[in-house]
Image: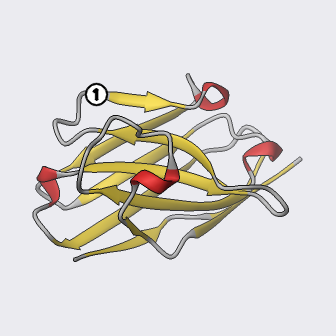
Amino acid sequence: QVQLVESGGGMVETGGSLRLSCTASGRTFGTYDMGWFRQAPGKEREFVAHIRPNAITKHYIDSVKGRFTISRDNAKNTVYLHMNSLKPEDTAVYYCAADLHYTGTWYDSRTYDYWGQGTQVTVSS
């Protein structure tokens, strides 16, 4: 079992920054992959970023490359999503997720075993 709790969402203006945090408990954090997804109103949940346990291998959706950075601190059981140059189209509920059985399909939400409750990010124009 893994429990995930997100924090750090809020409302910012276009061009602003936010840092999301997701703290895990349960299974040893440094042994599994983590991802961030988001879901805007009326849209399907979409992949945003992924990071392997080594904190080196990372993947991003094209629309956030160069603006968002995923990182993790295994000693603090926490994964972060640093979001810069935010745009109104980034507005969504952001979810962190844990993948305990890595298969390489890090972009697919069905790969992930546990999810946080979500945190709202709103970017005003």
Position of residue 5 relative to residue 108, above or below, is below
Instruction: Provide residue 82's location: percent of width, then percent of height.
Output: 48, 43
Instruction: Provide residue 84's location: percent of width, then percent of height.
Output: 59, 37
Instruction: Provide residue 55's location: percent of width, then percent of height.
Output: 22, 36
Q: Is residue 74 left or right of residue 96?
A: left
The residue carrying pointer 1 sits among few (fewer than 14), some (14 to 19) or many (20 or more) residues within 10 Å by Cα, namely few
Position of residue 100 relative to residue 52, above or below, is below
Position of residue 66 relative to residue 49, above or below, is above
Residue pictured at 33% horizontal, 59% vertical? 98
Instruction: Provide residue 18's location: percent of width, then percent of height.
Output: 56, 51
Residue pictured at 43% horizontal, 29% vertical? 59
Q: Which quadrant holds residue 27?
A: bottom left
Which residue matches tag 1? Answer: 57
Secondary structure, mark 1, is loop
Q: Is residue 91 left or right of residue 34?
A: right
Amino acid tagged 1: Thr
Q: Which quadrant holds residue 67?
A: top right
Placement of the N terminus among the 4 image quadrants: bottom left
Q: Is residue 60 left or right of residue 114?
A: right
